Image (cartoon, grey):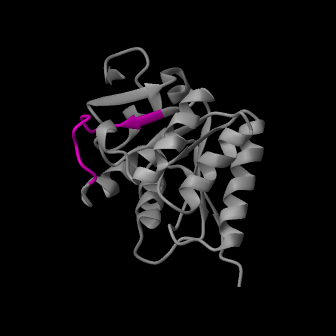
Amino acid sequence: MKVIYQAQKFYPEKLTHIYAPPAKLYVLGNESILNEPSIAIIGCRKASPYGKKVAYEFAYKLAKKGLVVVSGLARGIDSCAHLGAVKASGKTIAILGSGFNHIYPAEHKGLCTEIIKTGGSIVTEYSPETKPIPTNFPSRNRIISGLSNGVLVVEAKEKSGTLITVDYALDQGKEVFIIPRKY
């Protein structure tokens, strides 16, 4: 585990321009990718099969083109985005709403291992012992959009963490792309 403070070399330049940039980041894996061109792929946890497929395919193709895929390690769209990047042998960054000793959801510990093996990273602003409490996740979302050059939304639900991330992205001047739910 590495700890990167705002004044250090590998602190992501993009985060210095957001509201309330984290004073420090805890990083497992490749910290150099935090400054590479990236796109966030986010969406609902209870995604449709179509949404999961789209998230996976976009992540796969964008990672193949060299973009780093950023997401929040949540069930549904987030995990499909990370998996797509990993399967493309690309790089992905998972932003946690907890510390490293409390990966959430727990079933994604193996995915975290795969992310690191393929040159990606797991990032959090929370100390290793911080538990995944609900108030951490909206705050985490500013980092997801902050690290990204743009945000791709797949199947957002009303009043969701996805829309919180979109609000952050718009406040940060990022482009937001939308893939609607297929009916």
* Residue 17 colored in magenta in the image: no
- What is the quadrant of residue 61 in the picture? top right
Can see residue 12?
no
Q: Residue at x 62, y 51 (%)?
A: 81
Q: Position of residue 166 (x, y in %)?
A: 48, 60
Report how many numbered discs are placed on residues in the image: 0
Q: Is residue 101 left or right of residue 32?
A: left
Residue furthest to the bottom in view is 183
- The C terminus: image quadrant: bottom right
Q: Position of residue 59 (x, y in %)?
A: 69, 48
Residue furthest to the top in view is 9
Q: Position of residue 46 (x, y in %)?
A: 53, 72
By secondary structure, the bulk of the magenta-drawn segment is best described as loop
Q: Is residue 64 left or right of residue 106?
A: right
Question: What's drawn in magenta, residue-wise?
Answer: 122-132
Q: Residue at x 33, y 55 (%)?
A: 137
Position of 153 relative to 157 (above/below): above
Q: Is residue 109 left or right of residue 183?
A: left
Can see residue 61?
yes
Q: Residue at x 63, y 29 (%)?
A: 118
Q: Position of residue 165 (x, y in %)?
A: 44, 58
- The N terminus: image quadrant: top left
Q: Is residue 114 left or right of residue 90?
A: left
Position of 181 relative to 100 (above/below): below
